[in-house]
Amino acid sequence: MASGGVSGVSLEDVPSLDLMTELLRRMKCASKPDKRLILIGPPGSGKGTQSPIIKEEYCLCHLATGDMLRAAVAAKTPLGVKAKEAMEKGELVSDDLVVGIIDEAIKRPSCQKGFILDGFPRTVVQAEKVLDDMLAKQGTKIDKVLNFAIDDAILEERITGRWIHPSTGRTYHSKFAPPKVPGLDDVTGEPLIQRKDDTAAVLKSRLEAFHRQTEPVIDYYSKKGAVVNLHAEKPPKEVTTEVQKTLL
């Protein structure tokens, strides 16, 4: 039997432990039900904390459209080349291109049990005419839309209190996880910084855009009975429990 190539690596060159681990993972995943999920929530609502847990628990692939576009551009795939042309002109990447990249991705073995879509669809047109049409052609549909519902005032407190140690990425929060000495990293004693995006003014404009664009998408899927509203202001462990109950 010829050895298959995975990302340019022959299977013969993959360490046995890695192969066995992956084989055991696939056997465990075989009994899991298929799930196609959309995660919707404003910046700071906890999607980034929950999506790896959901991915692991249900053997799904995580499709963050921004990351996927960057990867397609870097890999110079035909769709990536087109996306790069649009970006260089300062244009938005067309819905067709984004869906083409999603369509390519969900055919991979890692997406066999389903996927988590993060960052798409952002508009009703993208949801109805693009994503749902593409899935209908494959005889599938979106199973659940997890809406990370949270009050804007709570988000402002969460986000504007974030401080980061630039060289390691260690994060602190002035209220929830403060450094021992204000403004300094616990380990190195070096100064902490705030991301440019983590200011009240930037957050306000991002939230306005989020509500304007995304709330109609939530309404669209609500009419299909697919939306589950999570209490995203709760501690992460409680949100995880809520997600697990939802996806039973």
Image (cartoon, helix red, strand yellow):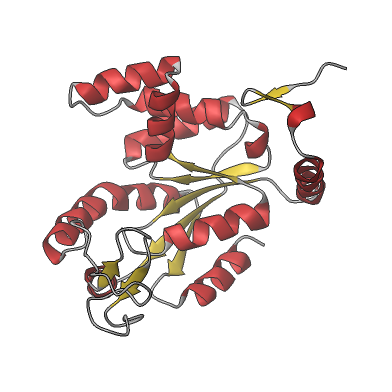
Q: Nearer the viewer, residue 167 or 132?
A: 167
The quadrant in which residue 44 appears is: bottom left
Q: Nearer the viewer, residue 219 or 9?
A: 9
Residue farthest along the left direction in this orientation: 201
* Quarter of the C terminus within the rendering: bottom right
Tell me if 113 is positioned left or right of 19 in this view.
Answer: left
Q: Position of residue 80 (x, y in %)?
A: 39, 21
* Quarter of the N terminus within the rendering: top right
Q: Residue at x 68, y 45 (%)?
A: 34
Eyeballing the image, is 241 above or below 207? below
Q: Position of residue 89 (x, y in %)?
A: 18, 21
Eyeballing the image, is 158 above or below 26? below
Q: Residue at x 22, y 65 (%)?
A: 193
Tell me if 164 is positioned left or right of 46 in this view.
Answer: left
Q: Nearer the viewer, residue 97 or 216?
A: 97
Q: Position of residue 35 (x, y in %)?
A: 63, 47
Eyeballing the image, is 240 above or below 131? below
Q: Residue at x 63, y 38 (%)?
A: 111
Q: Position of residue 14 (x, y in %)?
A: 74, 34
The quadrant in which residue 124 appears is: top left
Q: Residue at x 38, y 60 (%)?
A: 168
